[in-house]
Amino acid sequence: MEIEVLSVSGKSVTVLQNVGPTTSVADIKKEVHKANKLSIHRQAIRLETRGQTLKDEETIKSLGLRSGSKIYVKDLGPQIGWKTVFLAEYAGPLVVYLWMYQRPWLFYGSGADSVPTHQIVHIAAGCYAIHYVKRLLETIFVHRFSHATMPFFNLFKNCSYYWLFTAYVAYHVNHPKYTAPSELFMYGGLAMFLISELGNLSIHVALRNLRPPGTKVRRIPVPTGNPFTILFNFVSCPNYTYEFGSWLGFTVMTSCLPAGLFAFAGMYQMSIWALGKHKAYKKEFPNYPKGRKAIVPFIL
């Protein structure tokens, strides 16, 4: 069986010889790489020039291709590893916040570091460090990524969001004229933050254990023996629910408007992601629990 591979512009890339029914899209990518040195991570294989990108595990048989069929390859452009992007996203806020925590003269003027610092400012710096150190460690030891790479431009887009918002929040919380909230807000928000951080970590570990190493197996996430995972009974993406809870707690704890803006900007984006994942779960699993919402129990 012969299959011709063309670029989306219609130019012939290569003709695959002796293709069998079990030949996968991943195998085709390797052959395309041999033909024109285009990295497999930059390739999107399609049945039509503007069609959906095929999954690596799909085969010639499952796609209904026959001898003489044509498929198309799109160059996705420069790519970068998901793990690399995540590490850059999370290392930046850690450095930026802790630097501004020192009240550098560049932002606050000379002598700002000698102004007495309220206890909540130290607690907030500790919480910010805990959050992003946790994220870095999860990226290295917990997360299993479905895709190896993403477009290189995403590095700048994602880092800009996290780094600049961190500078905005840190500038206000660490300002010499910052006004501390009441102890009720301070300790209530701190408790919410810490509980949500533990919940977020618990969900990430539970999701990791759903997928055996080196596979792309997908299963319906369900509660485990960890009480924090009970939230799976109510929402499809409890990691996002806990993430918002962390930043809502940080906002209450510091009573800082920029922190609140960051929390709700994140909630908006996470809601979009959660709704997409919730829809995908229902489409993929006919027996998916009908009572679950996407991110907010009983509401959204």
Image: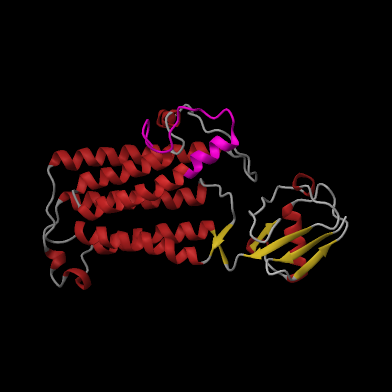
Give percent across and percent down for residue 278: 49, 39
Q: Quick check: 287 left or right of 296? A: right
The N terminus is located in which quarter? bottom right
Relative to the observer, which residue lies in front, 112 or 203? 203
Q: Quadrant of residue 185?
A: top left
Relative to the observer, which residue lies in front, 296 or 219? 296
Q: Is residue 289 above or below residue 294?
A: above
Q: Quick check: 215 left or right of 120? A: right
Q: Is residue 110 above or below residue 161?
A: below
Inspect the magenta stretch and tell me whether residue 287 lies in it: yes
Give percent across and percent down for residue 243: 37, 44
Q: Is residue 115 above or below residue 231?
A: below
Residue shown at the point (41%, 28%) measured from the top left: 227
Q: How many marks?
A: 0
Give percent across and percent down for residue 298: 37, 30
Looking at the rendering, the stretch of residues picked out in magenta corresponds to: 276-300
Residue shown at the point (45%, 37%) measured from the top left: 203
The C terminus is located in which quarter? top left
Residue shown at the point (15%, 72%) measured from the top left: 109
Which secondary structure dominates the residues rendered in magenta? loop
